[in-house]
Amino acid sequence: MNSRIPPQSLATARRWCAPLLLLVLVPAAFAADKTPKQARKAPVAVVAPVAEKRPLQHSDYDGWRSILSQSLSPDGRFAVYGLFPQEGDGEVVVRDLQSGKEYRQAAGQRPAPPKPNYASMEDEPPQQPKVTIAFTPDSKWVAFSTFPIKADVEKAKRAKKSEEAPKGGMVIVNLLSGAATRYERIKSFQVPQETTAAGPLVMFLREPEKSSAAEDASKDDSAPAKGKKKQYGSELVLRHLDSGEELKFADVTEFQLVKDGSGFVYAVSSKDESTNGVYAVFADMEKVPAKLVGGPGRYLKLSFDEPQKQLAFLSDRDEAGAKKPRLKLYLWQRGATEAKALASAETPGMKSGYLVSEKGSVTFSRDGQHIFFGCAHEHAL
């Protein structure tokens, strides 16, 4: 078959091919011209000097920030977390995940981990403290702990006065408005885990006054022998968050708020030792506060079982005047008028020479039928 290209198509093809031929021939011409005299000077690339990177220093690591203690509100709307550098003051961030709005509160410098206590019964080494965060069940409020600021910590170190060391605090934030209330020198706080009939609330224990326990002991004839410090309680506050109303209790060393917020218990250590004891405050009681057991001595390790119907704790009230008073384990069941001693060094089954120890924790089994507590040989206490 004899095929011919029409003249019109041939002219069109020439117009398209001409530039392509030029592109192919131009590099070839440059490649063929290799004589030194006729060689064209190659373009010189100018490279800008690159600044030499500075190696990382320890001060750089100190500025890196870490997120810790991140927590979500019960309704999933708010996220709260700590943001702390390796050294220096950090902050707590409250973020509304719906709107993206943030509230930030200064949270001080995160302390270093405490030194291990090899004489204790704890299996794990002490961890570096974290921010404690607690939401109210209605997701309208959040409370979180803070640390002392770096400047105050450094000042106390220079003064070398341990009794004047700065203490951590607490911040309560209204999640809807962002309004914040700050408290200084707070030892611990608790928020109910379930919605309460009285509305959202928080209970917190203040740090003792700055006067040293040794000075208090020198004024107290019943104080322990020299070398031991008498420990007194401080103010316990129950705050209703919606109304701002507060109830206060004096000389408290520790407390436990039940999960549904219907009541609480607390231990008292006062200069007036006749007021020492464990007290309960519940709506169904005829008289509150109700003393579950009392008298001179120490009361510690308050612990509820899972249904919050039984309370266990330790006390040396029966030997408060002895040189080395021994502890007993006590049990109180809700509805009873007083707590009863449950275990001591004389309890059948207790190993000879062993005593109830405050170094171990006091806990219930899941079904509430057993109590676990620490014991130690009398020579080790």
Image (tube, rainbow, N blue to C red):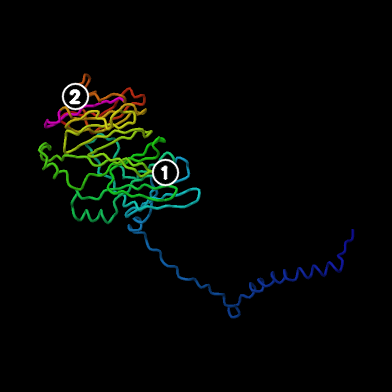
- Binning the other alpha carbons within 10 Å of mark 1 as few (below 14), some (14 to 19) or many (20 upward) gives some
Q: Amino acid at mark 2?
A: Ala
Q: First in sequence: mark 1 or mark 2? A: 1
Question: What percent of the width, then of the height, locates residue 275?
Answer: 19, 34
Report the number of numbered marks: 2
Relative to residue 13, is residue 347 drawn left or right? left
Identity of the residue drawn at 33% across and 33% down: 263
The image's mark for residue 316 is: none
The image's mark for residue 71 is: 1
Q: Amino acid at mark 1?
A: Ser
Residue wearing tag 2: 345
Identity of the residue drawn at 64% across and 74% down: 30
Check residue 210 for magenta coloring: no
> What distance separates the C-alpha of mark 1 from that of mark 2?
44 Å
Residue 49 higher or lower than 261, as above or below: below
Question: What percent of the width, then of the height, locates residue 82?
Answer: 38, 49
Residue 288 higher or lower than 12, as above or below: above
- Binning the other alpha carbons within 10 Å of mark 2 as few (below 14), some (14 to 19) or many (20 upward) gives some
Check residue 330 for magenta coloring: yes
Name the image quarter holding residue 322.
Answer: top left
Q: Which residues are magenta?
A: 319-333
